Image: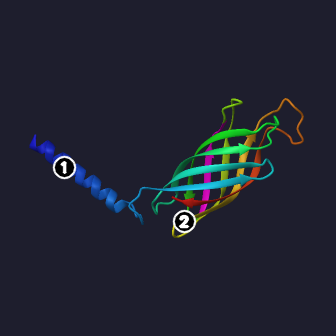
Amino acid sequence: MKTLIKIIVAFIILLNMSTLHSQETDSTKNFKNSLHVEATAIVPSYGLVYNFIQNSNFKPKPYFGIGVQYFPHSVSHENVFTLYPHIGFMYGKSHNVEANIGISLDLANRDLHIPIFVGYRYLAPGNILNIKAGLTFIYLGKSEEDSFIDLPMFFPLPTIGIGVAL
């Protein structure tokens, strides 16, 4: 029994020491929280996105988040709101290359799309300001109606965003 207790204590100490020295963090928090607004062009949409970014100097930095998107003029000529959970990574310290993939869920029309974002994100050294720019690719499948583009295809949407760290 004493041997088992010694093994458990040694394991706990080893676990605490390995996490203490293995992560080079500037902060005691494990995650940075960021809130930003973003907009896309071509197919106008606006979004409010909340991200949980792993706070470490490990590259790439994984993150996950959730957002709400608003499409004022959809194909069906009605306002569409979507829920947007996503996961991704950023590579860099303050100037980051970013990529994420998510699911855009339109619960009212029971429709979903898979957006893929590739771009750049600037995180200010004080972790106050977030600026992002890039392309969001959305897969458009075959359509019943006539289209001015050849479907199916990944449709690129220029995306910009600005936000704050919380």
Tell me the kind of residue under disc 1.
Val
Residue closest to the eye, 50 or 21: 50
The answer to whether residue 3 is above or below residue 107 is: below
The span shown in magenta is 96-105
Tell me the kind of residue under disc 2.
Ile
Residue closest to the eye, 127 or 149: 127
- Residue found farthest to the bottom: 125
- Point 67% across, 39% down: residue: 82
Mark number, residue 158: none
The x and y percentages for residue 21 are 33, 62
Sort mark 1 into few (<14), some (14-19) or many (20+) by Cα contacts within 10 Å.
Answer: few
Between label 1 and label 2, give the one nearer the viewer.
Answer: 2
Task: Report the coloring of the rendering.
Answer: rainbow
Mark number, residue 128: 2
Element type where label 2 sits in the image: loop
Residue closest to the eye, 81 or 32: 81
Q: Main secondary structure of the magenta part?
A: strand
The x and y percentages for residue 4 are 15, 42
The x and y percentages for residue 139 are 73, 41
Residue 58 lies left or right of residue 159; in this view the side is: left
Element type where label 1 sits in the image: helix
Q: Answer with the quarter of the image where residue 105 lies.
A: top right
- Point 54% across, 56% down: residue: 34
CA gap, disc 1 and disc 2: 40 Å
Q: Answer with the quarter of the image where residue 161 lies.
A: bottom right
Sort mark 2 into few (<14), some (14-19) or many (20+) by Cα contacts within 10 Å.
Answer: few
Residue underneath mark 1 = 9
